[in-house]
Image (cartoon, grey):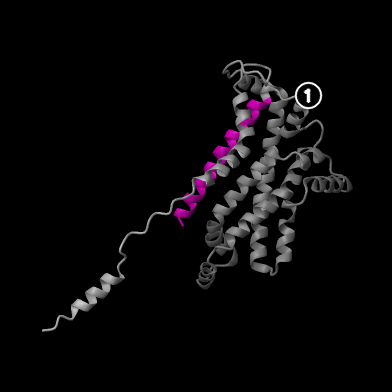
Amino acid sequence: MVDTTAPTTTAMRELEPTARPRAVRKPRGILVPLWLGYVFLYLPILIVVIMSFNASENLFVWKGFSLRWYPELFADEKIMQGLGNTLIVATGATAIATVLGTLLAYGIQHYTRGGLIRAFAIAPAILPDLLLGIGLLTLFSLASITLGLHSVILAHGVFATAFVTAIVLARMANLDPSLEEASRDLGAGALRTFMRVTLPQLAPGIVAGALLAFTLSIDEFVIAFFTTAPTQPTLPIVIYSMVRFGVTPEVNALATILLLVSVVTVIAAQRLTRLTGSTR
C-alpha cells in the first residue's frame, strides 16, 4: 500500500519556517529627540510648579519648601474676584457653545452639502483673537450693548461654538446612519430620533467639546480684554495686570492650581468618554 501522506507531510515541512523571525530592535537614538520634545514642552510648566512652593519672595532664590503662597492666594481679593468672574463667563459660554455647536453640527451634517458652509461654521476657531475681539467690540458698540460679564460670555460663546461644532461634526461622521433610518421606519419622529438615538451617540463628542470650551474660556485673554468692563476683569486680565511689574509667587501658585484643575478635567473627560462608549 502506497503511503499518500508522505509527500504532503514533506511539502508542509518545507513550507514551515525554519526559524522564528528575530525581533526588530528599535533604535534607541530615536528616544533622544522624543525626550527633548517633552522637556521643551513641559519644562516651563515644571518650573512654575516648583517655584510655587518656594519659601522666598524672590523667584530666583530658593529658600526651601513652603505652602505659604497658597493661603495668601485665596486671601487676595483681586484674584478671587477675577476667578469668580472667569468661572461665571466660562460656565455661560460653555452652555451657549454646547447647545449651539451641537445643533449647528447636526444641521450641517443632515441638511447641507459641500464644505463651504462647514468651513464658515468652524472659521471663528482659527481666526486671530485680535480680529475677533475688535469685530465683537464694534458689534457691541453698534448694537449699544454695554460691556460687562454678559458681553464676555457672548464673545467667548462665539469662538467656543466653533470648537464644539468641529468636535461634534467629527463624532457625527463616525455614526451609523442606519440607526436613525431604523428609528424613523419604526415610527419615531425627527425630534424623538434625535433625543433617543442620535444624542446618546453624540454624548462623548458633546462632553469633549464642552470641556474644551470651558478650558479655552478660562485661559482666553485677548477677546476678554476687548469685550469686558474695567470693573469686571476676568482672571487672565488680573494676572496680566499683576505680572507687568514682575511675576509674584501668588501667580505661580494660581498657575499650579489651574494646571491641576486642567489635568483632572482631561482625565474625567477621558473616563466619561470610555464609560459612554461602553454603554452603547
Q: Residue at x 60, y 42 (%)?
A: 37
**On screen, residue 56 above or below 202:** above
Q: Is 64 inside the magenta-drawn segment?
A: no
Q: Which residue is found at the position 62% from the left and 55% from the top?
A: 167
Q: Main secondary structure of the magenta part?
A: helix
In the rendered image, which quarter is residue 59 located in?
top right
Give the structural element (helix, strand or loop) at label 1.
loop
Question: What is the x, y in percent for residue 261?
Answer: 58, 35
Q: Position of residue 216 (x, y in %)?
A: 67, 43
* Number of marks in picture: 1
**Residue extending farthest bottom:** 1
Q: Quickly name the residue at label 1.
A: 245
Amino acid type of disc 1? Answer: Phe
Is 264 included in the stretch rendered in magenta? yes
Seen from this angle, which residue lies furthest right?
Answer: 142
Q: Residues within 10 Å of mark 1 (few under 14, many from 20)?
A: few
Which range is magenta? 251-280
Closer to the camera, 156 or 2?
A: 2
What residue appears at the point 64 percent right and 42 percent down from the top-left corner? 215
Q: Could you tell me if residue 141 is visible in this image? A: yes
Q: Position of residue 157 (x, y in %)?
A: 72, 47
Vertical placement of residue 118 versus 53, above or below: below
Which quadrant holds residue 248? top right
Q: From the viewer's perspective, is 178 left or right of 87?
A: left
Point 75% across, 24% down: residue: 246
Q: Is residue 124 above or below residue 217?
A: below
